[in-house]
Amino acid sequence: MFVTMESVVEFLLLKLAATGDLGSEDGIHKRVLSIHDHWLTEEEAVHGTLSFGLLQSLPEYRFYLAEEDKFVTLFSSLFRNSEACYFDYHNHTIQPLTSWQTLVANTTAGLREQQHFLFYISRFRLLLASAFDLNVAVYFLDPQQQAPFEELANTYQLHLLQ
């Protein structure tokens, strides 16, 4: 399986890898994929933020793994049902995503804030980029794909925040 990538998609993927963000000037609709169904208030964030680097006990670790698994399971579903590619930060190249092991290794390392991940999922015409505190930035190249992707994410108990 290899993604035949449009030049605009390649440009946006490379720009996102280089700058860490894409703006509305690029014609992109950005949302955040989260375990929370709303943006946390400052007070909620004190107790509700979940970050691998802040875990202090085995129960916290187990809870973290259960939440992380929601992302891994969703991304595995996307991988099974769509052509995909990823940005290889070590070689600074775009590679076809053909291995489940590569998907899981990149996903978990990114969610744990150990390294970034950046995936392109052709079925939904979107870019997924690792973010902080067990969140993922979602860049929709086609705004019509937001509702179908959100419906899929909700089945994994994940939420798209505005």
Image: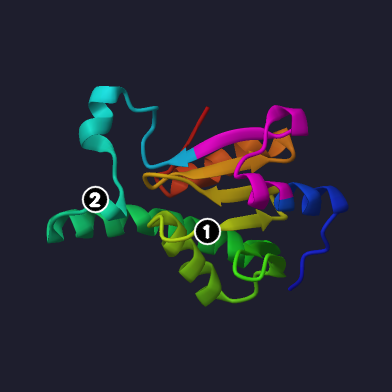
Can you give x and y, in whole percent of width and height, for residue 149 in the image? 59, 43
Q: Which residue is mark 1?
A: 75
Residue ranking furthest to the right: 7
Magenta residues?
Answer: 15-32
Q: Is residue 126 magenta?
A: no
The residue shown at (48%, 68%) is: 104
Q: Which residue is mark 2?
A: 54
110 vs 162: above or below? below
6 vs 19: above or below? below
Q: Quadrant of the N terminus?
A: bottom right
Can you give x and y, in whole percent of width and height, for residue 146 in the image? 63, 36
Type of residue at label 2? Answer: Leu
The residue shown at (50%, 65%) is: 106
Q: Is residue 27 magenta?
A: yes
135 vs 86: above or below? above
Numbered marks: total = 2
Tell me: 127 left or right of 68.
right
Tell me: 90 left or right of 61.
right
